[in-house]
Amino acid sequence: MHKILFIQPTIYDDKGLLVKKRKQYFVGLAHPLLAALLPEGWDAEICLELTEEIPYDTDADVIGIGGVGHAAKRAKDIAIEFKKRGKTVFMGGPMVSLVPELAKEYCDSVMIGDSEETIVELCHDIERGELKPFYQKPLTSLSTPPPRFDLIVNKKIGDFLPVQAGRGCPNNCSFCTISCLFKGRYIRREIDEVVRDIKQIKALGFKKFLLVDDNIVSDPEYMLELCRRIKPLKMKWMSQCAIQIADNPVLLKAVADSGCYVLSFGLENINPQALKDVNKAWCDPNDYLRVLKTVNAAGIEVASEMIVGLDTDTPESIEATARFVEKSTIIAPKFYCLTPIPGTPLNEQMHEAGRIADENVLEYKPSKSVLNTPNMTADEVTEQYWKLYERLYSMKNILRRTLFNKRFFKHPVRTLFFFGVNMIYRSHIKRRVAPNIL
């Protein structure tokens, strides 16, 4: 028997210390899924470093390291340590896929892009002693066996598990790694398989799931049928999508009726020119408040993601962003510094303009700007980023959008939950750790 130890790394905080938490709420789907795809004669373990210590003395002969972009530096350090111990190490994930040559310096092999159709090949090559430096094969189908959630359900995780409906996105925002990797492609799963996975999660004792999909409204007819199938299961769920759902009342009602209680929107910025600059002109910031109220009125809470450090940003525009969020129905606002991830059009554009203040991609993270803008230096952008977070996660603002809000009388239990979420985010901000990154 061969064994792979899959590791989901944590990150370093601004002091260079490992970020640790009591629970890992957002559990990645990649490792349970890849574990289910392993060929005969292979087994797997999963380590969630956010809540666990890495078992460097593992009996696994192969180490697979994944994780999102801001965990790249930690992933590198883990790979180096296991290589010292004589283990075969491979790496994968969005950041690794965009800088495979850099990642290869620290491991034996790199899986570029989607790994479902290459994991078996990698395992057989290891058996033969013929491991290739890179593995890459375009994804042609999202049909998979049920994920190996048995490998993580006894760990310190939250009260929901991930289910995937589709992968990719039809939009092409210039800063987005999804856009860069999928180039406008969107592949959806058969509804029977999605429902099968939701039922598996319910059978494991969970009452909630996270629908992993970069844009669930890109195929309204598909989503309507999926909602029809989800509703009888009486599960609560969360996802993210484009704001156009607010203008499809039939779909919005179906999503809400099926148990969706949170949607996350990538609003990015409240300046129309800023959105044009990043190929997201199809969003109208002047309509954001209406959109958010419409979704909220359907019984769905709104989380948001916005970018700090676009060309139009100034201290005054960021102040206006704070006022916009305070006026909105957003219950959990999140922010990211604009980051020129290698491989994206943004990186090429900023590199040619000589505006990248730090070319070390292993240091990139959502809480630190590396771009000098027309109005602010990279350090000034970072300063404004934390000021924005500190203001919006003051006790006054947390209470205003939770316990001292009319939503508390409509959904008291749910609002209490989000009060707790806001307080956790507040504690992260005080530690200079970007909220909701793990």
Image (spheres, helix red, strand yellow):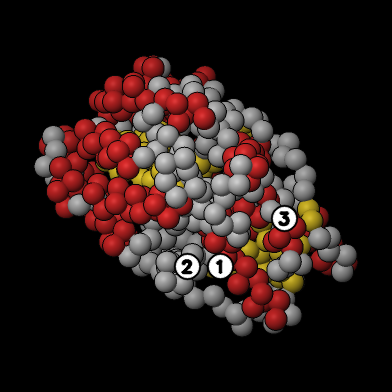
Q: Are marks 1 and 2 in contact (CB under 8 Å)?
A: yes
Disc 2 marks a residue whose amino acid type is Tyr
Q: Are marks 1 and 3 in contact (CB under 8 Å)?
A: no
For mark 2, does the 10 Å Cα neighbourhood hold few (<14), some (14 to 19), or many (20 or more) residues?
Answer: some
Tally the numbered discs: 3
For mark 3, does the 10 Å Cα neighbourhood hold few (<14), some (14 to 19), or many (20 or more) residues?
Answer: many
In the displayed structure, does residue 308 sit left or right of residue 329? right
Q: Is residue 30 above or below residue 234?
A: below
Q: Earlier in the sequence, mark 1 or mark 3?
A: 1
Label 2 SS: loop
**How far apart are labels 1 and 2 at the CA level?**
7 Å
Q: Depth check: 120 or 150 in front?
A: 120
Label 3 SS: helix
Q: Which mark is residue 74?
A: 1
In the displayed structure, does residue 85 sit left or right of residue 220? right
The residue that mark 3 highlights is 100
Disc 3 marks a residue whose amino acid type is Pro
Q: Earlier in the sequence, mark 1 or mark 2?
A: 2
Name the residue: 59% across, 30% down.
Answer: 172
Q: Where in the figure is residue 173, as x and y percent of width and height?
A: 55, 33
Q: Earlier in the sequence, mark 3 or mark 2?
A: 2
Label 1 SS: helix
Disc 1 marks a residue whose amino acid type is Arg
The residue that mark 2 highlights is 12
**How far apart are labels 3 and 2 at the CA level?**
22 Å
Name the residue: 74% across, 71% down.
Answer: 88
Q: Where in the figure is residue 280, as x and y percent of width and height?
A: 50, 27
Q: Depth check: 294 or 289 in front?
A: 289
User: Which corner quadrant of the image does residue 360 belong to?
Assistant: bottom right
